[in-house]
Amino acid sequence: MQAGCGARSERRGDASDDAGAPSTAGTGGATGASSAGGTGGTAGLTSSEGILVIPVEARHTNSLALMLDDGPEVLGPALAHEVSLAFGSEYPKKVTFDLLGSFIFEEAGTLVDATSGLELTSATAVSAGITARRVDAKHFELEVQAEGNFSIAIDGTWSPSAADQPLAGPFSVEVLVRVHRVASAVLNACGASPRYVVSGAPFQRPYLQLYSAEGDSINPANASGTRSATISVHARAGTRLSAADGIGSLVAVGDEQTLSVRHGDTEIGSFELVPPARVDGLRTRFVERANWIRGVSELSSGSKVYLHSSSLEVGQVHAAPELFVGGVPVCTQIVPAWFDPRSKTPDVCPLVTPPQCDVCSENTLPEAVSIEELGTCQFVVDAPELNGGSGLSEELSIQVVPPN
């Protein structure tokens, strides 16, 4: 679930929905719908056969952000420019780049948005093994034929919209293009082993780091950032595995077991799948969100918060639970349906469901309490189904006082 203060799911257990009709993808009984290319996502990948294959999502377009500095005659590069491409049958050899979102340094050191006045005049390959060509004033195309390190030259002009802008004129930039096969992958996930994940809850956004045979890191511009290499998730048959968009959106629903994540035949990580009842620890972060606070202010029992008379300045207290198994933080997001937040003092701070809190943490519950009267405010977060069904609970007691 994309947390913050959003809508509460009424289901318990499975936190994801499948969208679209599935089609076969990969091997081992994994099913799903993969993108035909470009930058779009997928309709969702699902499997109940014990293996979920998450294939590469090819990307045929990307952006190159130039960072230029002023020179005596030509606007030169202020930073080294580099593009990384993965080489192999799963990755497109031809990628179109745009120069939108480029920037130029002023003499004073401030950044100027150069997008509107930027015009590409040529894109040429400096070395063999790669071709480059200008598509139009904002785009160029790269095509690779082999692995290795190559260079291309990007030339153009910048015509600023402001008449008094001193940095007008031609620019010339050499871009290093690194093309390598993906030899290995590392799964970056929360914490050290054991990594507990709760059945039915989205994983806490693990991601892949790719490497070449020489040990160079690869961040391929010709693949989606969320699906940069083909991986597989292995579980017992009957375990429901789903991923809306790559390993970072994985949800597993099944019995207690070890889940294995593999790149090719190599295991790159594992997770211990546990039912919600195995969660035996709860720590809740309570924060105040108000118009007069930049971001949020963390609260603890005994804290004081101010009551403002204007209806436009009503403060709210939000709750962000963190779950534990045997003292180890779990590596999944929360499922709001596991929790029963309530106000023990509704006359002072009633429970409300406000619009999404854009500065709250990802695990913030949809409900909050609204600070509306002077007195003691008691905010309770219960999780009745956790801890073997005995439940877990956290309570915040604060004082609402008049403003200074």
Image (cartoon, helix red, strand yellow):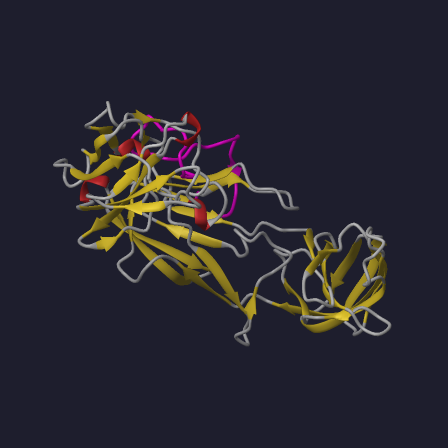
Instruction: Relative to 193, say whether 27 is above or below.
Output: above
Q: Nearer the viewer, residue 221 or 339?
A: 339
Q: Residue at x 64, y 65 (%)?
A: 84
Whether 6 is among the magenta residues is: yes
Residue 179 in which image quadrant: bottom right
Q: Nearer the viewer, residue 92 or 355?
A: 355
Q: Nearer the viewer, residue 346 or 335?
A: 346
Q: Which residues are magenta?
A: 1-29
**x then y, percent, for residue 1:** 40, 38
Q: What residue is shown at x 37% (from left), y 47% (from top)?
A: 203
**Would you say 341 lies left or right of 227 here?**
left
Q: Quadrant of the C terminus?
A: top left
Give percent across and percent down for residue 213: 54, 74
Counting from the top left corner in percent of width and height, residue 352 is at 33, 26
Residue at the front extreme of this rendering = 404
Q: Report the residue that reaches farthest toward the top.
A: 347
What is the x, y in percent for residue 160? 82, 54
Is 358 on the left-hand or right-hand side of 202?
Answer: right
Q: How many marks?
A: 0
The answer to whether residue 356 is left or right of residue 337 is right
The residue at 51%/47% (across/down) is 26
Taking depth in this image into account, of 126 and 102 the one nearest to the observer is 102
Q: Decide: is 99 above or below 22.
A: below
Q: Hey, which quadrant is residue 381 in on the image?
A: top left
Query: Is 70 covered by the magenta stretch?
Result: no
Helix, strand or loop: magenta stretch: loop
Seen as rendered, the residue at the extreme bottom is 214
